[in-house]
Amino acid sequence: MSRILLWLSGVDRKLLGKCTRLPESEVLRFEGYGGLVLFPPTVGFIAMGYAVYTFVPNMPAAIAAGTVWAAFVLWIERFLSMTMHKSTLRSVYHFWAGFAVRLLLAGVIGYGLSHPITLLLFQGPIDQEMADQGRARMREAYEQGEKIKTQAQESLKPSARQRAWRTSRRT
């Protein structure tokens, strides 16, 4: 497990092996970084698997989608953790620029995942509201049709002048 965590943290194990005076706490620190890199893909696997299983109740499809998503998140996390480090050659600006990119990416991925799940969770109230709006539009159209019908019937009724002219012609 230590090898996997060190690989995830982006440590060069050959270089780490050459450091004879390296305290054990430094190795544990790099393993901790590897654990931090492993956490988001694990959560992503669970979230994507659940989301896919909710829409398509097929366990193999949910596991496959979760695995693909976890691999994608792992690739991004490992890349970002390997490139986001402090050194004497880089300025503070580079550190915060990398941090901002990571934060933006996390926001986009979070929104992309949360929006479909939110729609799924509130599907019942959304359907109810759409049905209510549809009934209101139908009622409005019916009332407007009745108003047009009444106006047409009124325009077809003979006026007092027309009735007088018709009665005078009959006599």
Image (tube, rainbow, N blue to C red):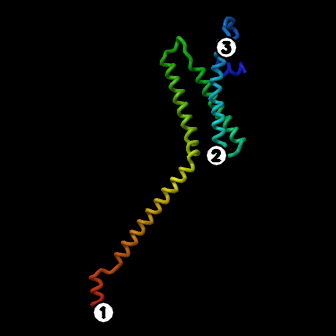
Would you name the residue on which mark 1 appears? 170
The 10 Å Cα crowd at callout 1, few under 14, some 14 to 19, many 20 or more, is few
Numbered circles on residues, count:
3
The CA span between labels 2 and 3 is 43 Å
Q: Amino acid at mark 2?
A: Phe
Query: Would you identify the image quadrant in which residue 76 lies?
Result: top right
Relative to 112, does residue 13 appear above or below in the rendering? above
Would you name the residue on which mark 2 appears? 55
Query: Would you identify the image quadrant in which residue 58 lies?
Result: top right
Q: Earlier in the sequence, mark 2 or mark 1?
A: 2
The CA span between labels 3 and 1 is 116 Å
Q: Amino acid at mark 3?
A: Val
Relative to 64, does residue 10 appear above or below in the rendering? above
The CA span between labels 2 and 1 is 77 Å
- Left or right of 83 on screen, residue 71: right
Query: Would you identify the image quadrant in which residue 73 lies?
Result: top right
- Left or right of 95 on screen, residue 36: right
Q: Quadrant of the C terminus?
A: bottom left
Percent across and percent down for residue 14 are 70, 13
Percent across and percent down for residue 122 are 56, 46
Would you name the residue on which mark 3 appears? 27
The 10 Å Cα crowd at callout 3, few under 14, some 14 to 19, many 20 or more, is some
Percent across and percent down for residue 126 are 53, 50
Please indicate, yes or no, whether residue 28 appears anywhere in the rendered image: yes
Mark 2 falls on what kind of element?
Answer: helix
Q: Amino acid at mark 1?
A: Arg
Residue at x 46% of width, y 63% of height: 139
Mark 1 falls on what kind of element?
Answer: helix
